[in-house]
Image (cartoon, helix red, strand yellow):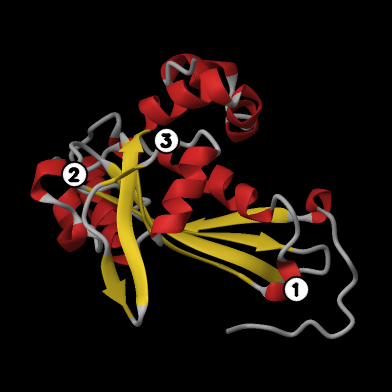
C-alpha cells in the first residue's frame, strides 16, 4: 500500500486531477507491425487500421486520481474484452454471460487520507467515459453484496451476474449491466448524476452514444 501522508494539505474534490494510463505494449507492437505492412503496400488508411478480429488497442487502463501536490490518492483498473478474455469470467453464471465488448473494473483502492466526498465518483466517471469511448457495451465489476445494494439504492442498476463467493475471508459477487440500461435508469432516477458522468462528452459523442 502506497501511503505517505506527511504534512499533506487538506484537499477538495476540485483540486483533484484524474489521469488515465492505457495501452497494451504487446498489442501495440503487433498493431504497429500490421500498420507498417499496410503502409508498405500503399493502403491509404494504414495509420488507423486495426488487425481483423483483434482485441482493443487500449485494452488495459489504470485510472489514477492525483492530489494538488502530485501524489496518487486513488486508483482503479479496467480491462476491455469479450467475456472469455476477462479475469472475472469464471465467476459469471453461464445463464448471465454478457454479450459483446465488456469493460471489466475488478478493483479500486483509495488511501485513507484521500477519502473525501465524491472521490470514488471521479473514478467511476473516468471508467465509464473510458468504456463508452472504447466501444464497450457492458460494465462489469467485482464487489461485496452490500456494495451492490448501495449501488441500486443510488439508482445505479447493476445486477448480480453470478453467485456470492468468498475470497480471502470476504464475500464478493460479479455485477454488471449494459451501459444503455444504466444510463436509462439514471436518466429517470438520478439525472444529475448522469449529467456528471457524461460531462466530458462532446455533442457528437452524445449523439453517437444515443444518450438519454
The quadrant in which residue 146 appears is bottom left
Q: Nearer the viewer, residue 92 or 212?
A: 92
Counting other residues with Cα less than 10 Å from the Cα at mark 3, is it few (<14), some (14-19), or many (20 or more)? many
Instruction: Give x and y (percent) for residue 136.
Output: 33, 37
Question: Does dot 2 land on a helix, a strand or a loop?
Answer: loop
With respect to residue 57, does 195 lie above or below? above
Question: Does dot 3 land on a helix, a strand or a loop?
Answer: loop
Q: Which residue is labeled 1 in the image? A: 113
Q: Are marks 2 and 1 in contact (CB under 8 Å)?
A: no
Horizontally, residue 125 falls left or right of residue 133, namely right
The quadrant in which residue 133 appears is top left
With respect to residue 208, does 52 lie above or below? below
Q: Are marks 3 and 1 in contact (CB under 8 Å)?
A: no
Mark identifier at residue 198? none
Q: Residue at x 51, y 33 (%)?
A: 155
Sequence-first disc among 2 and 1: 2
Q: Nearer the viewer, residue 137 or 116?
A: 116
Q: Which residue is labeled 2 in the image? A: 51
Q: Nearer the viewer, residue 71 or 152?
A: 152
Counting other residues with Cα less than 10 Å from the Cα at mark 1, is it few (<14), some (14-19), or many (20 or more)? few
Q: Residue at x 10, y 43 (%)?
A: 95
Question: Does dot 1 land on a helix, a strand or a loop?
Answer: helix
Mark identifier at residue 157? 3
Q: Tell me the quadrant of the picture where the N terminus can be found.
A: bottom right
Amino acid at each position: 500500500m502506497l501511503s505517505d501522508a506527511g504534512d499533506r494539505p487538506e484537499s477538495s474534490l476540485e483540486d483533484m486531477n484524474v489521469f488515465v494510463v492505457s495501452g497494451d505494449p504487446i498489442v501495440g507492437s503487433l498493431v504497429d507491425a500490421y500498420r507498417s505492412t499496410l503502409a508498405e503496400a500503399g493502403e491509404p488508411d494504414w495509420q488507423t487500421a486495426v488487425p481483423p478480429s483483434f482485441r482493443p488497442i487500449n485494452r488495459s487502463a489504470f485510472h489514477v486520481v492525483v492530489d494538488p501536490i502530485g501524489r496518487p490518492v486513488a486508483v482503479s483498473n479496467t480491462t476491455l474484452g469479450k467475456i472469455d478474455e476477462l479475469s472475472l469470467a469464471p465467476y459469471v453464471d453461464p445463464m448471465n454471460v454478457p454479450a459483446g465488448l465488456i469493460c471489466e473494473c475488478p478493483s479500486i483502492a483509495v488511501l485513507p487520507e484521500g477519502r473525501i466526498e465524491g472521490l470514488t465518483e471521479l473514478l467511476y466517471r473516468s471508467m465509464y467515459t473510458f468504456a463508452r469511448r472504447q466501444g464497450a457495451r457492458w460494465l462489469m465489476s467485482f464487489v461485496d453484496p452490500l456494495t451492490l445494494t448501495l449501488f441500486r439504492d443510488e439508482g445505479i442498476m447493476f445486477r448480480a451476474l453470478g453467485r456470492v463467493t468468498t475470497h480471502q475471508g470476504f464475500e464478493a459477487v460479479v455485477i454488471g449491466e449494459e451501459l444503455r440500461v444504466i444510463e436509462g435508469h439514471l436518466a429517470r432516477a438520478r439525472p444529475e448524476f448522469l449529467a456528471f458522468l457524461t460531462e466530458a462528452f462532446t455533442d457528437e459523442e452524445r449523439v453517437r452514444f444515443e444518450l438519454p
